[in-house]
């Protein structure tokens, strides 16, 4: 392992904020996913994908990689496009919330959000460069599964629109 990889990765949460870090830390591991892209006209497209979560930066953050569709290099996934991106999730005790940064260099998509628990769910909210609101939610969370919803609310709209739904199941060792 290179020094970079060794210094980036961590074995677990930093003890200083271990309880708060488990909001996303519970996802650490490898996941199989079924992705459903929802078009504004009601069309749906389904593809397999994979998601990988891990501890980084002395256990002070969680990073993930989302690959949709799988295998890498597949034909373009309608509506949502192909994803090969990463999220950096950093707990910020000064706001008792998570600062979320999504990077998908292949599609030139970059998002910033704030994530917090909302009941049994996790909700991340932010805006796009054009001013549309984004809401990404983890729902139906169990030890071995979750449902992720990617929604958008254009600045001129009154309702949220579901763009992508992901049903994930933990990969068995």
Image (cartoon, rainbow, N blue to C red):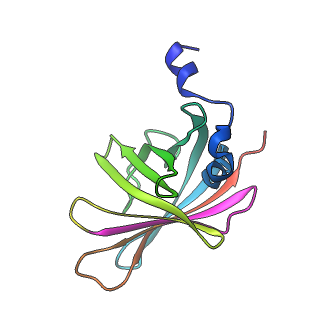
Q: Position of residue 136 (x, y in %)?
A: 47, 64
Please name the residue shown 76% across and 56% down the image.
143
**What quarter of the picture does the N terminus occupy?**
top right
Residue 138 lies within the magenta run: yes
Residue 14 vertical position relative to residue 161 in the rendered view, above or below? above
Residue 130 vertical position relative to residue 7 in the rendered view, above or below? below
Please name the residue shown 56% across and 34% down the image.
56
- In the figure, is residue 169 to the left or right of 82? right
- For the record, the magenta segment spans 132-149
Q: Position of residue 116 (x, y in %)?
A: 53, 63
For the residue pair 123 and 104, the one nearer the viewer reads as 123
For the residue pair 88 and 81, the one nearer the viewer reads as 88
Q: Main secondary structure of the magenta part?
A: strand
For the residue pair 160 and 112, the one nearer the viewer reads as 112
**What quarter of the picture does the C terminus occupy?**
top right
Residue 171 vertical position relative to residue 3 in the rendered view, above or below? below
Q: Quadrant of residue 81?
A: bottom left
């Amino acid at each position: 392992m290179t020094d970079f990889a060794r210094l980036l990765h961590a074995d677990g949460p930093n003890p200083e904020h271990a309880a708060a870090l488990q909001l996303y830390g519970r996802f650490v591991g490898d996941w199989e996913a079924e992705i459903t892209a929802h078009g504004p006209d009601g069309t749906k497209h389904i593809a397999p994908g994979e998601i990988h979560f891990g501890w980084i930066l002395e256990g002070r953050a969680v990073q993930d990689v989302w690959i949709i569709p799988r295998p890498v290099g597949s034909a373009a996934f309608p509506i949502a496009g192909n994803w090969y991106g990463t999220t950096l999730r950093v707990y910020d005790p000064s706001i008792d919330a998570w600062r979320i940064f999504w990077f998908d260099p292949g599609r030139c998509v970059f998002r910033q959000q704030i994530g917090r628990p909302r009941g049994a769910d996790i909700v991340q909210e932010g805006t796009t460069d054009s001013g549309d609101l984004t809401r990404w939610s983890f729902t139906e969370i169990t030890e071995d599964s979750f449902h992720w919803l990617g929604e958008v609310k254009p600045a001129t709209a009154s309702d949220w629109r579901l763009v992508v739904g992901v049903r994930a199941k933990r990969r068995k060792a």
